[in-house]
Amino acid sequence: MAERTADATTGAAPTGALWRGRRFARAWAAQTVSELGDRVSELALPLVAVTVLDESASRVAVLTAVVWLPNLLALLVGTWVDRRPRPRRLLVVADLARALVVLTVPVAAVLDGLTFAHLLVVALLLGAWSTLFRSAWQPFFVALVPRSRYVEANSLFSATRSGSFIAGPALGGGLVQLLTAPYALVVDGLSFLASASLLRTADVPDRVPAPDDGSSVRRRVVDGMRHVWHDPFLAPMLRCVSWVNLFTMVVQALLVVFASRGLGLSAGTIGLALGVGAVGGLLGAVLAGRVARRIGTGYTAAAGALLFTLPMAALPLAHGTDLAKAAVLTAVEAVSAFGVMLFDVNVNAVMTAVIPDAVRARVQGAFTTVNYGTRPLGAALGGLLAGLVGTGPAIVVGSVAAAFSLVWLVRSPLFGLRSVDDLPDPDAP
């Protein structure tokens, strides 16, 4: 019998499971612990503002907006990352920096010096280092995973991200009730340190940046944005995901405040409801590839966009006992999380497949600048709407508006795409 050779990037046999490869397994483990910590902080940070500092819904929305504000510079960051041969090193640095930043919150609480201004600075710095991390992740990913296994790898990463939405909120809610919100953030700091340690050992081959053509940073920035706007797949995907992010952030910026004050649920109950509901996301990540093989990549992404957005409009319908209100929150989270995984896994696989490696980080940065740049606008819009019409109606507006993102998909070549394998290789000679 012929001996199978090991895959050069993952250390696994080409037909074997990706997670058996040493490098992939360590990168996957790093992502797992980091995502778990992130879910804790996503619940704990706004709860610090709500329960410790007694801030309004509008101020909490501003805090959420500030986290995403640095993404407006993602194109510049991506252009710089494109010239770096070792993206793994950048990932480690970003993780260490984020650990240091988030751990200042419990330290300030111990010293009785915690203020809203401090939380804003923490949110801004976390957003900045996360922008660098996301810019460096794509070049790292393509060195780690063979092109033919992009969907499989994205499914695995999305599965653990979905798993973090199951365990993370429940863990975060319990820690907030046990330790109070500021000290629950210690878990996120430790998760960043663990991620950095694992990524240090997930050694991948250095990439060879494209030869320096003498063009200025401004020219490379313009090239990255031009590539996005003119690519037949990237351009409509950017319009779609930017629209989704703009209006779903209206909902996300208000969710914890609405659940805590509007529904009167405790931190532990909120965390448990979101955690149980997140099982839908894990199921979506596991089934995303299978559904795409059955009905096509484009149709799966479109179905995911609707399932992700529309259920959020049911949140203000929750009433009755705490159990009944928590059940509605759980059900909405389950369907929405299932939808976002169908959407994300397939859209991310297409994005990875159509971007040439020589300009990957700058094109990804251009995409992120517009895409994630809408998130602070959405969070700010959520705060404005909450002040004008109330938290519940603002959530309904955000949910229904987000569902119209489907228009951008239906009118694009992505909608009829059967498989990522049908896309041409942008790096083919």
Image: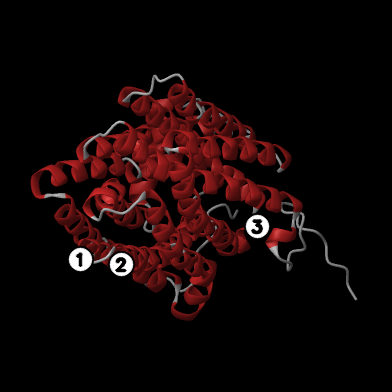
Q: Nearer the viewer, residue 261 or 365?
A: 261
Q: Residue at x 30, y 31 (%)?
A: 53
Q: Position of residue 409 (x, y in %)?
A: 31, 64
Tag 2 near tag 1, CB within 8 Å: yes
Left or right, residue 411 beside residue 290: left
Q: Name the residue beneath numbered marker 3.
A: 146
Marked residue nearer the N-terminal end (2 or 3): 3
Left or right, residue 247 beside residue 279: left
Q: Residues within 10 Å of mark 1 (few under 14, many from 20)?
A: few
Q: Nearer the viewer, residue 144 or 130?
A: 130
Question: Secondary structure under badge 2?
Answer: helix
Q: Position of residue 328 (x, y in %)?
A: 30, 67
| Coloring basis for residues | secondary structure
Q: Amino acid at mark 3?
A: Pro
Q: Name the residue beneath numbered marker 1.
A: 317
* Image quadrant where residue 57 sits: top left
Q: Residue at x 59, y 47 (%)?
A: 33
Q: Position of residue 106 (x, y in %)?
A: 48, 28
Q: Amino acid at mark 1?
A: Leu
Q: Reply above or below: 415 against 233.
A: below
User: Does any portion of residue 216 appear in the rendered image?
Assistant: no
Q: Quadrant of the N terminus?
A: bottom right
Q: Reply above or below: 104 against 374.
A: above
Mark 2 vs mark 3, foreground winner is: 2
Left or right, residue 228 beside residue 150: left
Q: Name the residue beneath numbered marker 2.
A: 328
Marked residue nearer the N-terminal end (2 or 1): 1
Marked residue nearer the N-terminal end (1 or 3): 3
Give me the C-alpha separation between circle 1 and circle 3: 46 Å
